[in-house]
Amino acid sequence: MKAVCWMGKHNVSVENVPDPSILNSRDAIIKITTTAICGSDLHLYNGFIPTMETGDILGHEFMGEVVETGTSVKNLKKGDRVVVPFTIACGNCFFCQKNLWSACDNSNPTPKTAETLYGFSGSGLFGYSHMMGGFAGGQAEYVRVPFADVGPLKIPDGLEDEQVLFLSDIFPTGYQAAENCNIQAGDTVAVWGAGPVGQFAVKSAFLLGAEKVVLIDHYKDRLALAQKENENLEIINFDESDVYEKLLDLTGGRGPDSCIDAVGLESHGTSPDALLDYAKAAVFLATDRLHALRQAIYCCRKGGTISIPGVYGGFLDKFPMGAAFGKGLTFKMGQTNMHSYMPQLLEAIREDKIDPRFVISHRLKLSDAPAAYDKFNNEKETWRKVVLKP
């Protein structure tokens, strides 16, 4: 089959690789009908995530048709259309039983690196390094799905692939980010990052009852899209306005009740701390660039919440712990507990409360993936979300 393979930093290619096969009675084989490139894939492309190996198959946002199931998979049959969550969960361990699906104890077969770095390993992830299990991803013609009796969500007739594809990651990720804010009536939520996760965080914050939502970025096309999609949205272009002062103006001098960092470890900025982040990361003296997170901590009101759906992978430099402690901030973060959100968000799509297709900027063939990665990495103004068809 054809698959998009990681061949090194800034180097992906479409290769012929062996077809997947059933390895466990709880496996399923899915024929991919639609997949996507995620902003998190760029962390792999740019070499920020360790334990990638040449030839690894990329992709954690995908859906398709069931073509084969293991003997223990009774909930799926050949021909079912399914969306597959990017986190892999067994359904039986202590954490799965507590709906902490992304903390599954049993789905990462290679936990040693994560345990060394983090103390414990999270769940396995599709197409996201050997630290996270070394599972082949879904930017391919076929994929093996472990624990298929737990993860895949069946899609009813009448919904197009593109309407439901983002249930695989970015829609639930944006929703969990907003839910983590514990939004109360009258709240103001500030969101850093107008990429797809930030766009869904904005939508979700309004769905959950926020009175005011403020989106912060400097890509004008992305900010314009968000304003078009959200009637009462406030925006801040950080190239044109001081973010802290503008947020004070918008909140009567108090600051936002909650701040969502939908940017993660490759944050952009022109302030001294951001420029130092660039320099240190370039010579491997730092692992992550966290300018957006620092700014969110600085801007959040006293007693507020910092929600972090943006991916961080290493050790954070110049983290303003004094500000966080002094203001009594609450932090909520982590990989998305996908299985808890997919069914209810599918219903939101069916009820026309949201049409996730609005984030798509490009529709391409799987063979176009190498050029798409390059464009997505370097032209973020117009390359927002890439959908691929095998």
Image: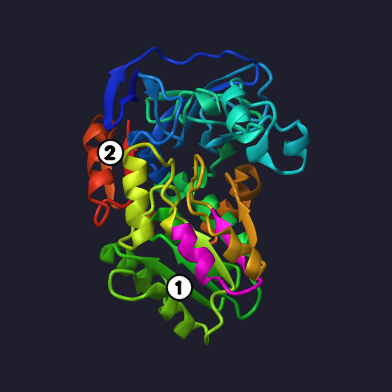
Label whose residue precedes the other's in the sequence (1 or 2) = 1
* Dot 2: element: helix
- Specify whether 50 is left or right of 8: right
In this view of the protein, which residue sits in the foreground, 20 or 317?
Answer: 317
Q: Where residue 333 appears, x then y in whole percent?
A: 60, 51
- Label 1 sits on what residue type? Val
Q: Write the residue at 27% across / 48% down.
A: 362
In this view of the protein, which residue sits in the foreground, 238 or 148?
Answer: 238
Q: Where residue 173 appears, x then y in whole percent?
A: 53, 51
Please indicate, yes or no, whether residue 54 appears anywhere in the rendered image: yes
Q: Where residue 326 appears, x then y in whole percent?
A: 64, 68
Q: Which residues are magenta?
A: 292-308
Please indicate, yes or no, whether residue 158 appears anywhere in the rendered image: no
> Split into 4 quadrants, where in the image is the C terminus?
top left
Is residue 304 within the magenta segment? yes
- Specify whether 19 is left or right of 362: right
- CA separation in Å, label 1 and label 2: 29 Å
> Split into 4 quadrants, where in the image is the N terminus?
top left
Is residue 96 within the magenta segment? no
Read off the residue under disc 1.
214
Classify 10 Å Cα crowding around label 1: few (below 14), some (14-19), many (20 and above).
some
- Label 2 sits on what residue type? Tyr
Read off the residue under disc 2.
373
Up-down: is 41 above or below 303?
above
- The total number of labels drawn is 2
Q: Write the residue at 26% across / 28% down.
A: 11
* Dot 1: element: strand
Classify 10 Å Cα crowding around label 2: few (below 14), some (14-19), many (20 and above).
many
